[in-house]
Image: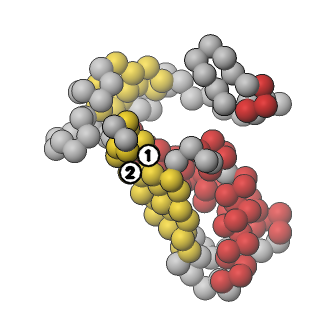
């Protein structure tokens, strides 16, 4: 368990080698805020959830990041197992923002498209990818999450 100012050592995954560090500056939060990456690639308005207009919701960013990472994890596992994945491998991600017991929380679903693969082989790849994907590992046991294969 972690608490502000008090971190349990066993919960921390120490990195042996840093491959990339994302840096961002956010102002305003969900109320017409702005998110900017340090390299200038992202300069995004953050609208209030459920409103119309321009901008990107943080849940959309999580969906994009998680699905891209999970897809790469599938390819990594397939390469190690010498399994061929379909060229049109794709993932649809959904991230929900909601409330339970008066506090905000997240739920997520990934739908993995492995058309043409035998079901047991596809399942084995997805299960292994879920163990490898940093986004899956970071959210494990923290949010409601489901994966389906089509």
Mark 2–mark 1 contact, CB under 8 Å?
yes
Left or right: residue 33 compared with residue 145 = left
**Element class at badge 2:** strand
The residue positioned farthest toward the left in the image shown: 52
Residue 142, image x and y in percent? Answer: 56, 44
The answer to which of marks 2 and 1 sits earlier in the sequence is: 2
* Residue identified by numbered label 1: 106
Q: Is residue 52 visible?
A: yes
Q: Which residue is farthest top?
A: 5
Q: How is the image coloured?
A: secondary structure
Q: Nearer the viewer, residue 18 or 12?
A: 12
Q: Which residue is depicted at the point 67% across and 58% down? A: 130
Residue at 18 percent across and 42 percent down: it is 51
Neighbourhood count class around disc 2 (C-alpha, 10 Å): few under 14, some 14–19, many 20 upward: some
Name the disc covering residue 96, or none. 2
Q: Residue at x 45, y 51 (%)?
A: 107
Percent across and percent down for residue 125 are: 71, 69
Instruction: Between residue 55 and residue 109, name the one nearer to us.
Output: 109
């Amino acid at each position: 368990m972690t608490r502000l100012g008090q971190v349990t050592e066993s919960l921390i995954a120490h990195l042996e080698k840093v491959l990339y560090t994302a840096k961002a500056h956010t102002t305003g939060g969900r109320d017409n805020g702005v998110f900017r990456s340090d390299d200038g690639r992202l300069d995004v308005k953050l609208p209030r959830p459920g409103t119309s207009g321009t901008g990107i919701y943080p849940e959309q960013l999580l969906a994009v990041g998680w699905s891209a990472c999970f897809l790469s994890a599938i390819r990594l596992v397939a390469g190690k197992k010498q399994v061929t994945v379909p060229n049109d491998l794709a993932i649809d991600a959904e991230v929900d923002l909601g409330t339970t017991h008066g506090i905000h929380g997240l739920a997520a679903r990934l739908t993995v498209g492995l058309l043409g693969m035998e079901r047991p082989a596809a399942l084995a790849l997805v299960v292994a990818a879920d163990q490898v994907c940093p986004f899956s590992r970071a959210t494990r046991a923290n949010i409601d999450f489901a994966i389906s294969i089509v």
